Image (cartoon, helix red, strand yellow):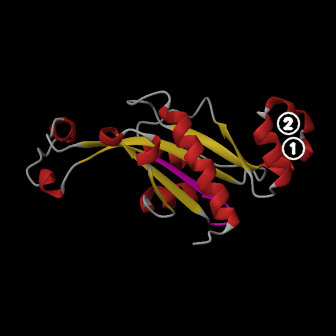
Amino acid sequence: MDIDPKLAALRDAVTEIEKFVATDGWDAPIRVFAIIRAVPALEATPELAAELPADVAVNAITDPHTLFSVEQEGLPQANTLEELLAQLAWPDEVDGAAIVAERIIVPPSAEKDLPKDPQRALIALSEHPEREDVRMAVGFMREGQSWCCVRTRSNDSDEMVAGSPDAVPGLVAALRATFE
């Protein structure tokens, strides 16, 4: 199946971001990345090519769809992922963004007898025997493309990372909103 080259470039960028974050292990904070098109970035800052691995520099020059990701540091203070996303906005030079976050998922049956208190409910979910830790890396481009990678702690290998344009629709929508 042929994939649109722009979507393929985003898929590759988000996959690389997820692999990069995975090297730091689990129980990590939320991480945010700006995504920029390589060719315009290299045209504006030619010395950037000297900082790249040789294979990346060659690909960036020969493939107009190649994307670079730049981790954002000094993120605004936020208590939740939603609060953080609500504070993000991107300058025109940024073509897209990616966010990486970890979450706990449980079967629907685990939610029926939760305590009313949010803190106690969170403790109950985190101690549930069927809980699964997941890492979600979601990328979105201004032009509308999205890609999601999902890794589970129980299948923690690069080969077991699942990906699709819409695996985490709520996070795609929230990331899209940072460009509006």
Secondary structure mostly seen in magenta is: strand
The quadrant of the image that shows the C terminus is bottom right
Of residues 95 and 17, the one drawn nearer to the viewer in this rendering:
17
Q: Report how far apart the C-alphas of labels 1 and 2 lie in the structure.
A: 7 Å
Of residues 22 and 107, the one drawn nearer to the viewer in this rendering:
22
Quadrant in which residue 122 is drawn? top left
Of residues 46 and 29, the one drawn nearer to the viewer in this rendering:
46
| Residue bounds of the magenta highlight | 136-144
Residue 6 at what x, y percent from top left? Answer: 69, 63
Of residues 171 and 85, the one drawn nearer to the viewer in this rendering:
171
Residue 161 higher or lower than 72, as above or below: below
Please name the residue shown 39% across and 31% down the image. Answer: 26
> Label 1's element?
helix
Give the residue type that dot 2 points to. Ala
Q: Do the residues under discs 1 and 2 have CB atoms within 8 angstroms?
A: yes
Please name the residue shown 62% across and 51% down the image. Answer: 12
The residue to which callout 2 is attached is 49
Give the residue type that dot 1 points to. Leu
